[in-house]
Image (cartoon, rainbow, N blue to C red):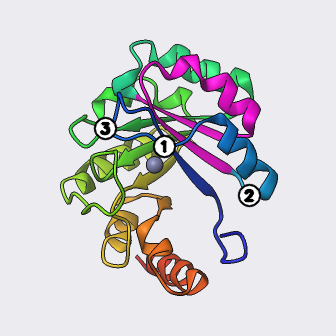
Amino acid sequence: MEEAGADWIHVDVMDGEFVPNLTIGPIVVEAVRRSTDLPLDVHLMIEKPERYVTDFVKAGASTVSVHVEACPHLHRTLEQIRESGARASVALNPATPATAVETVLADADQVLVMTVNPGFAGQKFIEGMLAKIETLRGWIDDRGLEVVLEVDGGIREGTIERAAGAGADVFVAGTAVFGAPDYAAAIASLRRKASDA
Ligand code: ZN
């Protein structure tokens, strides 16, 4: 992926509780960390993520995303991520409104808008998420914040332009890259579509 031109490596961590699928833990992140110097964007789709934040940062995460739906003490968890030495990101499921993160926006480095229901690869982009991206973009700009706005799920040619047009600035692509015969061509083409939007 580094040779193919990716800017970051996004790592989906699932616990079989918060989402109905199981993936990887800190040991795999540590192995990925040894393989690349690119920033590791670790997306925790797990219950009680505060239990593992420090482990993932120690394993090499550059950014840690926790879900607002899994964090009753979200502000504290974001502080914990920063204190551990990583960028603090908050993720929202499709059914969660933008207002769920409005009060912590100034305390986050990144907001991750899920554009599919988390758990499985290859799902279809949910169009209704564009309005949420626009709302968050508006708040970030109006308040002069440096928060990065990331989208994750169903990002490919045909959806990346619309997510970029709505104000997203980081795009997670799985199937659109790994399902393509030429990773570098796929990334270059997605990058072009996003910057033309
Ligand atoms: Zn993800």
The residue carrying mark 1 is 23
Are the residues tagged 1 and 3 within 8 Å (C-beta)? no
Q: Residue 160 bears which disc, if any?
A: none
Mark 2 / mark 1, whichever is N-terminal = 1
In this rendering, position of residue 5 left or right of residue 157:
right
**What is the x, y in percent for residue 156?**
38, 73
Q: Residues within 10 Å of mark 3 (few under 14, many from 20)?
A: few
Displayed quadrant of residue 168? bottom left
Mark 3 highlights which residue? Answer: 20
Pair 2/3: label in front: 3
Q: Which residue is mark 2?
A: 38
Residue 157, how many percent across, how many down?
Answer: 37, 78
Mark 1 and mark 3: Cα distance apart in space: 10 Å
Q: CA distance from mark 2 to mark 3?
A: 29 Å
Report the amino acid beneath label 2. Leu
In the displayed structure, does residue 98 sit left or right of residue 170? left
Q: Which residues fall within the magenta stretch? A: 40-67
Q: Secondary structure at mark 1?
A: loop
| Residue 75 percent across, percent down from the top left | 50, 17
Q: Are marks 2 and 3 in contact (CB under 8 Å)?
A: no
Frontmost residue, 133 versus 190: 190
Q: Secondary structure at mark 2?
A: loop
Indicate whether 75 appears above or below 148.
Answer: above
**Residue 52 colored in magenta in the image:** yes
Which residue is nearer to you in this view: 86 or 2? 2
Residue appearing at x 63%, y 18% in the figure: 80
Q: How many marks?
A: 3
* Tag nearer the camera, 2 or 1: 1
Which residue is nearer to you in this view: 78 or 167? Answer: 78
